[in-house]
Image (cartoon, grey):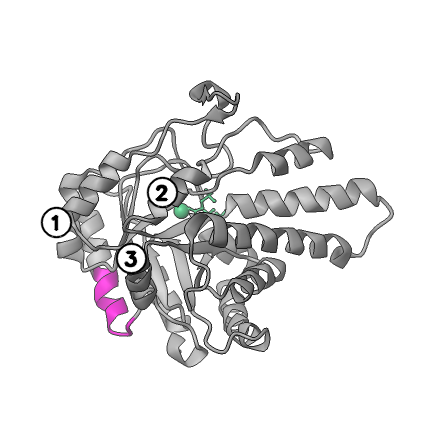
Amino acid sequence: MVSYKELGLVNTREMFAKAMKGGYAIPAYNFNNMEQLQAIIQAVVETNSPVILQVSSGARKYANQTLLRYMAQGAVEYAKELGQPNPQICLHLDHGDTFELCKSCIELGFSSVMIDGSALPYDENVALTRKVVDYAHQFDVTVEGELGVLAGIEDDVQAETHTYTDPAQVEDFVKKTGVDSLAISIGTSHGAYKFTPAQCTRNEEGVLVPPPLRFDILEEVQRRIPGFPIVLHGSSSVPQDKVKIINANGGALKDSIGIPEEQLRKASKTNVCKVNIDSDGRLAMTAAIREVFVNKPAEFDPRKYLGPARDSLKELYKHKICDVLGSNDKL
Ligand code: G3H
Ligand code: 13P
Ligand code: ZN
């Protein structure tokens, strides 16, 4: 058993309390390789901001959970080396689906876990979440639960439509489980294909605008559990400039629209304390790599295409921090 505290990591408790008070949200960026982690750490050091590093099941299968934990430990030292004496870095299990998985991550040094029982019947979700909370809190590890099901792809689970969070359940869920934060479903979804152009309308400038997030549900949730940290999954915005670069350089992405940054900016000022972003990073990396492959076809040193991908990722992460979530200069 390793305590995350020995690794210099932090849980989400103080991060969320400060975010709630300050009217901003913390980015939760997924990582599964070194370049992504370097980009995240460089971005948060340069913006003097806290961050949540997320490890999904896909990441665990791809990169190995132990290796990822040591990389996160290294990330704390890397941040210090880059000039941040007191980095606020949380290592979080994204979409944990069993008690055993949450327990093994806690024992390995994770400072926060998500137990996602959102697809289970309500009582089973409550019981599973309670079990994880009881274990995690012994070690001061924070726990995120979920109510409501997002549309889209989540690891191997695909839901065709949203099951929006029922605000009438949140008070009971939070009370019975003892969770530290709650992910809710208000119209965001996982992956790069959130909305088709047919689901959108055009504004005066001709830009496609998707249906707005259900801020009415968020407000009702806030009314029922005031001051309680809320999490938004599926919050990529699918930058159209990256999609264009990918498709202009041999890619074949379908038309897709993400969550407008304006909506995320608005949500960040509310009780939403954690915003999950993965797909936008994938698009930024892919765009940069495809450009190198097309413009320099003789290049075969991975550093020559992963380097530009890392630089592009860092800019994307800094943009989210400074221009969307408002978590810059909060250390
Ligand atoms: O929740 C979804 C995240 O984007 C992680 O996806 O399991 O493919 O790494 P992944
Ligand atoms: P995106 O696919 O919108 O980036 O969402 C990521 C996520 O919610 C990870 O848990
Ligand atoms: Zn998610």
In the image, 168 versus 87, the foreground residue is 87
Q: Which residue is mark 1?
A: 172
Give the residue drawn at x 56%, y 75%: 83
Give the residue drawn at x 38%, y 29%: 160
The label shown at residue 48 is none
Residue 107 is situated, as x and y percent measured from the top left of the image, at 37, 72
The reply, left or right, for residue 247 in relation to residue 292 is left
From which residue to which does the magenta span run? Answer: 131-140
Q: Callout 1: 10 Å neighbours few (<14), some, many (20+)?
A: some
Give the residue drawn at x 20%, y 48%: 124
- Whether residue 9 appears in this view of the structure is yes
Q: Which residue is mark 2?
A: 266
Mark 3 vs mark 1, CA separation in Å: 21 Å
Q: How many marks?
A: 3
Q: Is 247 inside the magenta-drawn segment?
A: no
Mark 1 vs mark 2, CA separation in Å: 27 Å
Specify which label sits upstream in the sequence, 2 or 3: 3
Q: Callout 3: 10 Å neighbours few (<14), some, many (20+)?
A: many
Q: Which residue is mark 3?
A: 20
Specify which label sits upstream in the sequence, 3 or 1: 3
Please, what secondary structure does the residue beneath circle 2 have? helix
Mark 2 vs mark 3, CA separation in Å: 13 Å
The reply to whether dot 1 and dot 2 touch (C-beta < 8 Å) is no
Give the residue drawn at x 45%, y 32%: 194
Q: Is 134 inside the magenta-drawn segment?
A: yes
Relative to residue 56, is residue 105 depicted above or below?
Answer: below
The reply to whether dot 3 and dot 1 touch (C-beta < 8 Å) is no
User: Closer to the observer: label 1 or label 2?
Assistant: 2
